[in-house]
Amino acid sequence: MLPQEIIRKVRNRDKLTAEEIYFFINGMSKGEIADIQAASFSMAVFLNGLSEEETLALTCAMRDSGEQITWQDMDKGPIVDKHSTGGVGDKVSLMLAPMLAACGAFVPMIAGRGLGHTGGTLDKLEAIAGYTTTVDTQKFKQVVQKIGCAIIGQTADLAPADKKLYAIRDVCATVESIPLITASILAKKLAAGLQYLVMDIKCGNGAFMENKQSAIALAHSIARVANGAGTKTSALLTDMNSVLGSTVGNALEVKEAIDYLQGNKLNPRLNEVTMALCAELLTNSKVASSKAEAEQQLQHALSSGKAYQKFVEMAVSLGADKEIVENYVKSAPIAKYTKAVYAQQEGYVATIDTRTVGLGVIMLGGGRTTPEQKINYTTGFSEFCQIGDKVDKKTPLCYIHAEDEAIIKPVADMIHQAVKINPQPPKQTPVIIQKIA
Ligand code: URA
């Protein structure tokens, strides 16, 4: 087989066989296929797409490019996970993993860093001093078995073909392709040996998929391919036209998640998304026989303090100091400056340009502008307004947390641009848009 003939077939919209796809991905992993050929392949796929069978073969080839974690020795509960396509203020994983563990499921979560304007679970967890997201498979398995959940980063051995192709796509303008996103996300998830997966497909002005049609297409693609590869998967389409919860920024989001787990503060939309994704996994995996039973189990996991305990145990097992985790809400490092951004007129919050809010966090140093950049964990926004909030000139739209005083004014200007206020209250829209099985 010749790599250029495989690229030519995709270019000409001819179908590839599974053998051709495996040949290409294996060659890429071993360095026998040049980066320019991988780049051409990704652009041909971006422009012409792949069939469902081809996407399944691409996913399996990338999954098989590295180690695959097995859990045969563990029969105490189902192996489950959730993946979000990325949003602003999306700290669901921090609560979902310990909540599911408290209900008897096992959650080996391979999470990512911030991408574009969206935040990343790994960056949030690294805001807890000592928490290490780079552990080997043996340690990962050990923590999952002992605690019930572990959230870590992609190890060098897990789906290395995805690592390589993703880095190429990132600089070749071929990220936003449904077959390539499907294969990239699922290669890592399937290599983690999951039995059940729920996808949170974000849709709206703070998501990669802005319109409902493309979000639904991605949800169908991921659900079909994952089910085809043997992992029972469903997807929820959730709204990303406003910040999820009341904070954006790494340490601030950890505080909100811990507050939620401790039962102190509950943002209704964040709660609805978290509960729905958890319930989906508990019912699919038969830990609960109905959505109502799943919700009861989850409420108990929260009210008994068991979910919060699981979070503490997970963080401590992965290197964090117990005292630091338990006192996080009160004692975690805070930014040097905190400044309220007031509404400039009276009315109701009508729309929020959520992508701009995500970019605001990057401006504050809480996200990256270069791959190796060290980020500032304390910065971001708290008490962010919600769609429909009644505001006047004395009402903060949010508080900016900054380490550099000079950045506060330009970021406040961004917030004023992003938050539109109308005299009439807006129509409320549901946070869970649709389920795709
Ligand atoms: N996240 C991934 O892991 N891969 C993609 O292609 C897009 C988002």
Image: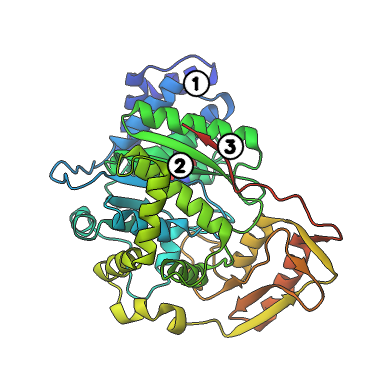
* Image coords of residue 90 (percent x, y): 52, 57
Q: Which residue is disc 2 drawn over?
A: 199
Amino acid found under the numbered disc labelled 3 = Ala
Would you say the beta carbon of the disc 3 residue lies within 8 angstroms of ligand 1? no
Determine the CA span between mark 1 and mark 3.
24 Å
User: Relative to residue 225, is residue 213 drawn left or right?
Assistant: right
Q: Residue at x 56, y 74 (%)?
A: 379
Would you say the beta carbon of the disc 2 residue lies within 8 angstroms of ligand 1? no
Mark 2 nearby-residue class (10 Å; few <14, some 14–19, many ≥20)? many
| Residue 217 versus residue 200 in the image, above or below | above
Say whether residue 161 is visible: no
Residue 187, picture quadrant: top left
* Image coords of residue 269 (percent x, y): 57, 56
Q: Which residue is disc 1 drawn over?
A: 10
Residue that sits furthest to the left in the current view: 73
Residue placed most toward the observer, 41 or 324: 324
Q: Which residue is disc 3 drawn over?
A: 215
